[in-house]
């Protein structure tokens, strides 16, 4: 699947589910665990792409892999939901 720092498959799944859940709470609405996982994992890619493009390193956000990854993933998932809603309202 993907690897962010020392996070492997199951770490990615946990962070993806949490990031999707946080994004749904921020943006409103609801989603099941599978939808949260999908939004969270895709949002993780978006968040990490933006973080890398801007030169932001996880160590600058938070010490340790979990919190930094979760913050970046949740931000990317929130952005993804905002774009999806804007397209749907078109």
Image (cartoon, rainbow, N blue to C red):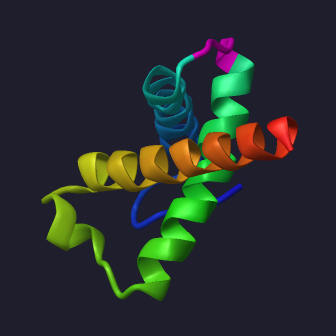
Across and down, in percent, residue 4 comes to: 48, 63
Q: Residue 33, relative to residue 46: is it above or below?
A: above
Quarter of the image for the N terminus: give it.
bottom right
Residue at position x 56%, y 74% in the image: 49
Residue 79, position as x, y percentages in the image: 56, 50
Give the residue drawn at x 28%, y 55%.
Answer: 68
Q: Please identify the dominant SS of the magenta region.
A: loop
User: At x 65% / y 31%, what residue is drawn?
Assistant: 37
Q: Position of residue 6 (x, y in %)?
A: 40, 62
**Which quadrant is the C terminus positioned in?**
top right
Position of 49 relative to 44 (above/below): below
Q: Is residue 38 left or right of residue 49?
A: right
Of residues 52 and 24, the one drawn nearer to the viewer in this rendering? 24
Q: Which residues are magenta?
A: 29-33
Residue at image coords 50%, 74%: 50
**Residue 67 makes an appearance in the image:** yes
Position of residue 44 relative to residue 41, above or below, is below
Task: Say whether residue 3 is visible.
Answer: no
Where on the picture, by quarter, is residue 34?
A: top right
Residue 56 % position (x, y): 31, 79
């Amino acid at each position: 699947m993907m690897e962010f720092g020392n996070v492997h498959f199951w770490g990615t799944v946990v962070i993806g589910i949490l990031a999707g859940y946080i994004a749904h709470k921020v943006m409103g609405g609801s989603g099941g665990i599978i939808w949260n996982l999908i939004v969270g994992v895709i949002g993780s890619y978006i968040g990490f792409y933006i973080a890398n493009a801007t030169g932001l390193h996880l160590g600058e956000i938070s010490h340790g892999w979990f919190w930094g990854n979760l913050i970046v993933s949740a931000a990317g998932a929130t952005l993804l939901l905002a774009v999806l809603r804007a397209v749907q309202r078109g």
